[in-house]
Amino acid sequence: MMDKFIKILLDLKGVKISVDDDLADRLNRQHSCCLLLMFSVVVSIRQYFGEAIHCWCPEQCASNHEKYANLYCWVEDTYYVPFFEKMPQPDEPRDQKISYYQWTPLVLMSQAVFFYAPCLLWRLLNRRSGINISRIMEAAISSQGAVYTENRDKTIRYAVLLLDRYLMAQRDSKKGCLSRFKHVLSKHCLFMCGRLYGNYLVCCYVFIKLVYVINAIAQLFLLDIVLGYDYHLFGLQALSHLVYGTPWHPSERFPRVSLCDFKIRQNTNVHRYTVQCVLPINIFNEKIFVIIWFWFLLLSITTFTSLMFWLASSLYWPSQFRFVKRQLRSMDVVTRDNATIRKFAECYLRRDGLFLMRLIAKNAGDMVATELLCGLWENFGLSREKELPPTNQCRTT
């Protein structure tokens, strides 16, 4: 429901939800945004259409005084003092101030923006590569659900054409020692990154993955500042209550009852009052931030695992070669020796082409990726093999 709602809002602005990443990325930029926006709406409704705070005033206070106290204590920070501790004196500082509850909806919306920002950066970077990944993914996914074989074949040929144009257009025609040295670096690592070296998309994608990981972990610690305590340990404390069966007591950072000091001027006299306030909104806040803690932990683990997978699959050439060979053999189209397959992988597809094949396999399925790979293999055998340097030169250029 929330995904459809967000998609409608985006469609109104002319923006479509594209499939140009993997599941771990969508957990960050789509599901996290939906979860945080949903929590923001729930808290906002409770705050502005319910009773977010209710303060107990002395008997001599009139009803308008009580309303004033509620509004004042909502706008100003309250503070927490356990019932077994003494009240601080008027001139003593209030240590455990509670200053986040007014801003919880904005904090949650800001977190949603931070989770969606890497997606916008990824799309900005991949569009600069010269290929529209979203269009290729849409073609691959539509071919998967095509009813008629003719439409499916036409869609596959269209995607193969786009991929072939991209793979052959991004070539470095320069000669010389410096150019060869740069290609050696790009061949064996990702330090030399660029479209001409065939690893631009991989470098950008790995960088975005790293941004997702840093974002998920950093937001756990940024909430320490917002909430004013060690939030990064909050989930462990909640988990210990569940494991050991201890009763769940209200947290000191999400108290149900707090205190509020305010002054009222009457003529030339200033009267100081301390009232006790109930914060029903903290019932929601506490449970919401417990869920968010575990969700951020899941995101951190999932995204880090995904980052390691893409690093390993992109850097280690033997696994790339085995991937291509396995896919081609599954369609019984391999009739050449391993050297030709290696040239196809290292000189024609290169890192970016192999990256796109793996991304298509994750989004549209292995069968569609294999058909696209077979189409590229046919193009390679018909004309592209003659245009590329020999295999031994591919290894050093």
Image (tube, helix red, strand yellow):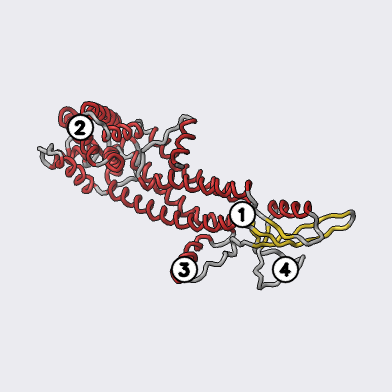
Q: Is residue 207 above or below residue 283?
A: above
Q: Is tag 1's residue or tag 2's residue first in the polypeptide sequence?
A: 1
Question: Residue placed at 34% from the left, 31% from the top?
Answer: 135
Q: Are marks 4 and 2 in contact (CB under 8 Å)?
A: no
Q: Is tag 3's residue or tag 1's residue first in the polypeptide sequence?
A: 1
Q: In which quadrant of the rendered image does the N terminus lie?
A: top left
Q: Nearer the viewer, mark 1 or mark 2?
A: 1
Q: Secondary structure at mark 3?
A: helix
Q: Nearer the viewer, mark 2 or mark 3?
A: 3
| Residue type beneath disc 4 | Pro
Q: Which residue is mark 1?
A: 100
Q: CA distance from mark 3 to mark 4?
A: 32 Å
Q: In which quadrant of the rendered image does the C terminus lie?
A: top left
Q: CA distance from mark 1 to mark 4?
A: 22 Å
Q: Is residue 347 above or below residue 110?
A: above
Q: Is tag 4's residue or tag 2's residue first in the polypeptide sequence?
A: 4
Q: Position of residue 24 (x, y in %)?
A: 37, 48
Q: Secondary structure at mark 1?
A: loop
Q: CA distance from mark 3 to mark 1?
A: 25 Å
Q: Nearer the viewer, mark 4 or mark 2?
A: 4
Q: Is tag 2's residue or tag 3's residue first in the polypeptide sequence?
A: 3
| Residue type beneath disc 2 | Gly
**Residue placed most toward the observer, 179 or 148:** 148
Q: Which residue is mark 3?
A: 240
Disc number for residue 88: 4
Can residue 371 be seen by looking at this rendering?
A: yes
Q: Which residue is mark 2?
A: 375
Q: Position of residue 68 (x, y in %)?
A: 76, 52
Question: Residue placed at 10% from the left, 40% from the top?
Answer: 337
Q: CA distance from mark 4 to mark 2?
A: 77 Å
Left or right of 375 on screen, residue 336? left
Q: CA distance from mark 2 to mark 3?
A: 55 Å
